Image: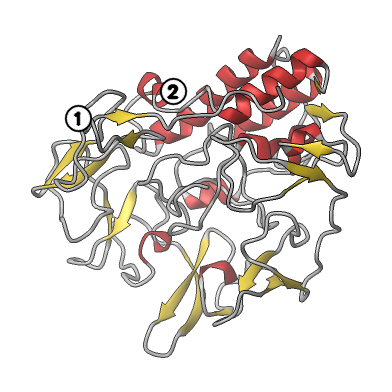
């Protein structure tokens, strides 16, 4: 799964807007103060997150679909300062993951069918969403209706009870893994096709860490303190609503919490230069390129590479950089130098190899299923 520090517009149905092959994407991404948004292309295929009617010709094949998907995603990342430019963004995203290799093999064998029309509708939605302005207000205002195309662009043939490695292989679009700790983006995770669970209504019990039993559209699973359980709650869109955490408020509202009493109210995210809640941090700023400065208590633009920064505030640099010796330094691209001890980090889905101290993509298993 991704690190808990990425950004993208929430659909508020317990499921984020999923993105192709990005489970491990940029550690510096920020939206709604690190709302633990998991980007996963193949989760997008198995749980609805995309839609609308296609305005461009549908992709001719899976490779074109992937290329257009990556380009759309990178458009927003560049706009928001999380990547320096589109070519660098695309080059920092791994396109030969085990998941993608598996779906290509499954299409070739007939185990999975690629629906070009649905894929075109999915791309139309994604290209529209990722062309939005980089503010909470703009992202919250996006039209997310017609959210079925991306759950239908891959059609599996394995019936319930059959063996699977990925949910897109199943008729039900749900593969229950034998090992919940297995990482399907890089490993072959054996499982069984099972029926989809009905969505949990508001007030119902849920498991925050589960991706197989989800709250109904418009709600999120709020953890219950000191337990592994949660409750499906509809985030409030009304200013002044009492809250105890970020999930209680729907963007562009945030929970303006008082840490002394452990509660607050939902308030609009504030403009650049305005006072912000340093305890809440990034989610209190409307512009996603801002951070809530500990020194000034205001929403402050994050610095580009070469700008001065505060090493005590990890968010003071734009996402494609990080603060080293009080200066924003670019994260390294593939085969670039890295050193976790010295703070030299990698861009995108790249990892710092402990043997070579260079940025490399994680190793993958070959296509699953043989």
Q: Return the x and y of residue 50 as percentages of the image width and height.
A: 71, 37
Using residue 294 as the reference point, say whether residue 97 is left or right of it. right
- Residue 101, compared with residue 24, is above or below; it is above
Q: Which of marks 1 and 2 is in front?
A: 1
- Residue 314, compared with residue 334, is above or below; it is below
Residue with the mark numbered 2: 90
Which quarter of the picture shows residue 307? top left
Identify the mark nearer the N-term, 1 or 2: 2
Question: Residue at coordinates 40% horizontally, 46% vertically from top-left?
Answer: 29
What colouring does the structure picture have? secondary structure
Using residue 283 as the reference point, say whether residue 226 is left or right of it. right
Q: Residue furthest left?
A: 325
Disc number placed over residue 337 in the picture, else none: 1
Using residue 250 as the reference point, say whether residue 198 is left or right of it. right
Depth order, front residue of 321/43: 43
Question: Residue at coordinates 84% horizontally, 56% vertically from top-left?
Answer: 197
């Amino acid at each position: 799964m991704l690190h808990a520090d990425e950004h993208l517009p929430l659909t508020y149905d317990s499921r984020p807007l999923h993105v192709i092959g990005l489970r491990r994407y940029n550690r510096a991404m920020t939206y709604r103060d690190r709302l633990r948004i998991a980007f996963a292309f193949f989760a997008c295929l198995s749980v609805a997150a995309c839609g609308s009617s296609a305005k461009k010709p549908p992709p001719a094949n899976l490779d074109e679909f992937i290329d257009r998907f990556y380009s759309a995603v990178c458009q927003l990342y560049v706009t928001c300062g999380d990547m320096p430019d589109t070519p660098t963004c695309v080059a920092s995203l791994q396109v030969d993951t085990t998941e993608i290799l598996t779906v290509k093999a499954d299409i070739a064998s007939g185990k999975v069918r690629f629906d070009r029309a649905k894929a075109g509708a999915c791309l139309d939605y994604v290209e529209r969403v990722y062309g939005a302005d980089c503010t909470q207000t703009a992202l919250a205002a996006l039209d997310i209706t017609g959210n079925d195309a991306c759950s239908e662009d891959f059609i599996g043939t394995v019936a319930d009870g059959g063996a699977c490695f990925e949910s897109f292989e199943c008729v039900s679009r749900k593969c229950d893994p034998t090992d919940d700790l297995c990482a399907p983006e890089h490993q072959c995770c054996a499982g069984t096709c099972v029926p989809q669970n009905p969505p949990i209504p508001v007030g119902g019990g849920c498991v925050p860490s589960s991706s197989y039993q989800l709250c109904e559209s418009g709600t999120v699973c709020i953890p219950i303190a000191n337990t592994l359980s949660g409750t499906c709650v509809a985030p409030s869109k009304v200013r002044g609503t009492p809250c105890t955490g970020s999930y209680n408020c729907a963007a562009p509202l945030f929970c303006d919490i008082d840490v002394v009493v452990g509660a607050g109210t939902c308030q609009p995210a504030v403009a650049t230069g305005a006072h912000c809640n340093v305890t809440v941090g990034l989610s209190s700023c409307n512009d996603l390129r801002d951070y809530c400065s500990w020194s000034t208590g205001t929403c402050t633009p994050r610095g580009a590479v070469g700008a001065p920064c505060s090493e005590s505030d990890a968010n003071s640099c734009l996402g494609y950089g990080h603060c080293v010796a009080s200066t924003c330094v670019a994260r390294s691209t593939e085969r670039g130098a890295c050193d976790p001890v010295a703070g030299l980090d990698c861009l995108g889905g790249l990892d710092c190899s402990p043997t070579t101290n260079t940025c490399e993509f994680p190793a993958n298993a070959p296509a699953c299923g043989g």
